[in-house]
Image (cartoon, rainbow, N blue to C red):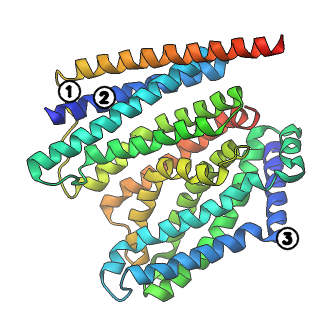
Amino acid sequence: MLNSLFDASVWTSLAAATVAAISSILFLRSRNFLYDSLALAVTEIGLILLAAGIVAGAIAGRLTGHLWWTWDARLTTALVGFLIYAPYLMLRRAVEEPTRRAASAAVVSIFALFDLPIMALAIYWWLARRTAPAPIGVEWTILPVAALGAALAWIRFRKEQDRRSQDAERRTAQEI
Amino acid sequence: MKFLRQVATVAAKDLRAELRTKEAINASLAFALMILLLFSYTFDPEQEMMRQISGGLLWIVFAFAGTLTLNRSFARELPNDCLDALIAAPIPGSALFLGKCCASFVLVLAVELVSLPVFGIFYRVHWTGQFPWLFLILLLGTWALTIIGTIFSALTVNIKLREVMLPMLTYPILMPALMSAMRLTTSLVNGQPIPDDDFAWLKMLIGFDVVFTAVSLALIETVLVG
């Protein structure tokens, strides 16, 4: 159960990473901040789900093998994926100017997506000698987890849009 | 041809500035030697285990010392608004980027080539036995480090948390390249040829270099101009 929750969160955050990179490319081409909000929302929710998935995976390992962390390829890949995407959010906080922030974040998102398959393959090779890695499975849990992720991302996206329109109104009010 | 000349001009400018001030290379070299020394307190240099982890240790030194150089790559241009002048210069952004990459590449490689004999003396590894292969891995691994480091150096140059953000962004993305370089270096610094199984890692390292050089060149205008 916990293991299948881990699998589901990995697939969902992988989908989130893909959506984030696509909307980042769309942002860079169109300079429409709608895409930037979308990229931010899915990355944030994807990271939260992935973190929850890693915790679930560690607990599952503890329950079955009495070890929290066994360096199995799936958990390690998920953790490195988390570390790749976490600076995305930190970078957004560090850049103040909105266009600059969105463009920098988009670049990081695109780099991260290109890195994911290479990284997963490298970790698979590295750990394959020690234990035969189990493939990441697809089970029924993926439906509720993906639905939850999509709902949360939608809420986050709407909130971000609201915040931005408020910001814009405040700025116009100040100008007047 | 014109493009290559522009790249060479930027690289020569950076190298000349670095050779006159020596601000990055001195720090980088001192830092590399310091970590090499510190390792001897963590691991017993006499033990056989040292041979099995030598590649990993070396690349940790290279990656950490390299970031010091890469941090300066674009930060050097901040005083007197040199960066704005460079971006406004009549050369494509990709030429500016590749020029800076080449300069950093030479500097990082120089630090590595100095640390390598020191590492060999301190830890008694016979790194000279397979030097041509080792040099190839150094070239490929260092190119991966400089290309990722330079593009993120350009990306973070204008933000306050620059020194913090650069390693945070660089190391996770760089991880596959570092893993291949570590794996390949471990057998080479012990004087053994690359095992047949490990040629896949060499391909991965080359693939990493090609993919990220292409992605960086495609995105560099966005990074520089915003």
Taking B196 as reference, is A100 left or right? right
Q: Which residue is mark 1?
A: A138
Residue that mark 2 sits on: A11
Q: CA distance from mark 1 to mark 2?
A: 8 Å
* Residue A154 in which image quadrant: top left
Q: Secondary structure at mark 1?
A: loop
Packing grade of label 1 (10 A; few <14, some 14-19, many >=20) is: few
- Mark 1: which amino acid? Val
- The residue located at (48%, 80%) in the rendering is B38
- C-alpha separation, residue under disc 3 versus residue under disc 2: 52 Å
Left or right: B104, with B178 as reference point:
right
User: Chain letter of disc 3?
Assistant: B
User: What chain is tagged by disc 1?
Assistant: A
- Residue at image point 66% right, 39% down: B217
Provide the residue designation for mark 3.
B20
User: Would you say the residues marked 1 and 2 are in contact, meaning their CB atoms lie under 8 Å apart?
Assistant: yes
How far from the left and from the top, in percent, is residue A57?
Answer: 22, 41
Are the two marked residues, 1 and 3, in contact with CB atoms closer than 8 angstroms?
no
- Disc 3 crowd, CA 10 A, few/some/many (<14, 14-19, 20+): few
Looking at the rendered structure, the kind of residue marked 2 is Trp
Q: Chain of mark 2?
A: A
